Image (cartoon, rainbow, N blue to C red):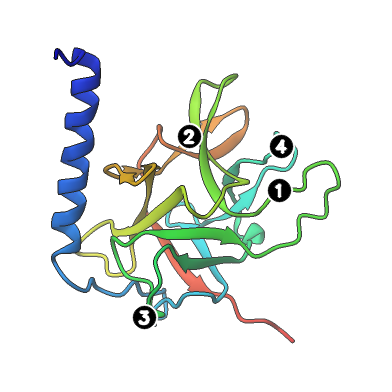
Amino acid sequence: MRIPKLTFSFLLFALTAISFQGAIDAQGPKDAVVDSDDNEVLLGLDYYIAITSPFDGMSLAMEASCPPPVVHRNNLSLLPIKFSSVVDSNDNVVREDTSLNLEFNVELNSSDCNVPAVWKVEFNASMKQWLVMIGGDRSHNRFQIAKACPYRKYFYQLRYCPVLGSIQFPCVTVRSLFKNGLNYMALNGDPIAVVLGQLVSST
């Protein structure tokens, strides 16, 4: 039986992705992600993610579309973000290069766009770009936090890790794309480093 060349190429890529992920998982526990105060980042707590230069916080462009895209704006727009693991674990520490769900811990307060605040990546046809936005489900929208520079302890990069069925493909670095007056988080654009900090409730 002859296997179509396109199908064979896809299967080969999928098997390579599985082997790649298996090799990573076999390396054992990863280093903890630390915030700007040198504390380990924990699952379920509120943090901000900010671009290092300029110091812009992650926010939502509710005026752009529904679901709204994730953008970075001035530091007055630091929306709380919480991390959750995609696998059951007794470890409540966020670790480098491990799959996570990212979610804004906010009330959208919009009757016109009532979607989950879980991050996902979706193709924007009008912009012809893959953009980070909210409205995702927890099983298929996985991100990782990876070290951006070995000489900058608190500098990280975000990665999107696409999943198709039971196959997790190699991760793609999230970048900053300036378009239409907004700084979008996207899979194309300028490389960025981010820092994390815990947001403490004032109550």
Which mark is first along the chain, 4 or 1? 4
Q: Is residue 77 above or below residue 1?
A: below
Neighbor class of circle 3 (other Cα within 10 Å; few <14, some 14-19, many 20+) is few
Which numbered dot is residue 66? 4
Callout 2 amino acid: Leu
Front-most of residues 52 and 45: 45
Sequence-earlier tag: 2 or 4: 4
Dot 4: within a 10 Å radius of its alpha carbon, few (fewer than 14), some, or many (20 or more) residues? some
Q: What residue is disc 2 on?
A: 177
Residue situated in front as seen by the camera: 111 or 61: 111
Q: Is residue 125 left or right of residue 108?
A: left
Name which quarter of the figure residue 180 lies in: top right
Q: Are marks 2 and 1 in contact (CB under 8 Å)?
A: no
- Type of the residue with mark 1: Val
Reading the image, the residue beneath label 1 is 115
Assign the N terminus to one quadrant of the image.
top left
Tag 3 residue: 91
Dot 2 crowding, Cα within 10 Å, few <14, some 14–19, many 20+: many
Classify residue 151 as left or right of residue 82: left
At 45% from the left edge and 67% from the top edge, which residue is drawn? 196
Q: Quadrant of the C terminus?
A: bottom right
In this rendering, the label closer to the viewer, 4 or 3: 3
Of the residues tagged 1 and 4, which is closer to the observer?
Answer: 1
The quarter holding residue 93 reads bottom left
Q: Nearer the viewer, mark 2 or mark 4?
A: 4
Q: How many marks?
A: 4
The answer for how far apart the CA atoms under marks 3 and 1 are is 29 Å
Disc nearer the start of the sequence (4/3): 4
Measured from the top left, where is residue 91 in percent x and y?
Answer: 36, 80
Instruction: Tell me how far mark 1 sits from mark 4, CA to CA.
Output: 8 Å
